[in-house]
Amino acid sequence: MKRIFLPFFTVFLMIFVLNGAEFRKDWKNAFAFAKKHHKRIFFVFHTDWCPHCRHLLSTTLKDPEVLSYLDKEGYVLISINPEKDREAEKRFRVYGYPTMIIYGKNGKEIDRILGYLDSNQLIKTIENFKKGIGTLNDLLRKYEKSPDDLDLIFGIATKYIARAEFQKAIDLLNIMISKAEKKNDKKNVIKGIMRKAYAYYKWKRFNVAADCMLEIAKKFPDSEEAKDAYLDASYYARKGGDEKRANDLIKIFIKKYPDDPRVKKLREKIKK
């Protein structure tokens, strides 16, 4: 009996996962279906070039436990590459990947998750969202009571970035950086500046993003972060089409850190 039962159960489970929790590509019809049947929506945005997206899609979002949970909770699943669907990119304002958006049965957005989560983290986060825990509104309420909590400010700013509300994110990060500087909290100053650079980068203000990274090198010239700051600034400048500035920053890096193991490849990059 065991030899007959186990293979049958395995096949049954595979059919359940594939058919009961299938990701849809047509987001318009998926939203219409969810509205008609009063279902929640789990929407994941990803790109082909994003390593974190590939990891999420091949692990967490293929985990039978996650798919079973989403199916049991009645989620309509949608998967979209907004760089291949510009209407979706414009409609949902998603510019960081991977981004997961959770909608309630009323069709309203509950919150967004920016970045990779493993299976346990994803299920826990969605469960918390259902209880109103960890959402943007929840964090904003906490911020009113604890305006000096730097981790809280950082978390709110990250949520604004996920919503493409870049100016709000930058304004908060400036507050975070100012508070951290008053406390001589180097770690959080650097953390805040780096996230501000990321916000400008997603806003496609590439040279401003580069300026932010150079601010780290200026304020903390002897730090390990200063090294990466020049290279990140170079990357942002190149993304903005400023090849001269990008190469000049690499030359500065090579001059300042000639013994860095990355120098050889960087020299070759400049020659090209």
Image: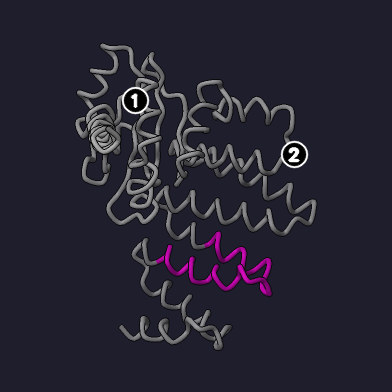
Q: Whole-percent x and y of residue 238? A: 37, 67
The answer to whether residue 54 is visible is: yes
Q: How is the structure coloured here?
A: one colour
Q: Whole-percent x and y of residue 254? A: 51, 84
Q: Which portion, as a residue range, is magenta?
A: 211-237
- Taking the spot 28% from the left edge, 12% from the top edge, the residue there is 37
Which corner quadrant holds the C terminus? Answer: bottom left
**Amino acid type, mark 2:** Asp
The answer to whether residue 79 is visible is: no
Label 1: element kind: helix
**Residue beneath label 1, please?**
71
Q: Earlier in the sequence, mark 1 or mark 2?
A: 1
**Residue beneath label 2, please?**
148
- The prevailing secondary structure element of the residues shown in magenta is helix
Label 2: element kind: loop
Q: Is residue 86 above or below residue 255?
A: above
**Amino acid type, mark 1:** Asp
Q: Whole-percent x and y of residue 234? A: 45, 69
Q: In the figure, is residue 236 to the left or right of 33?
A: right
Q: Nearer the viewer, residue 58 or 138?
A: 58
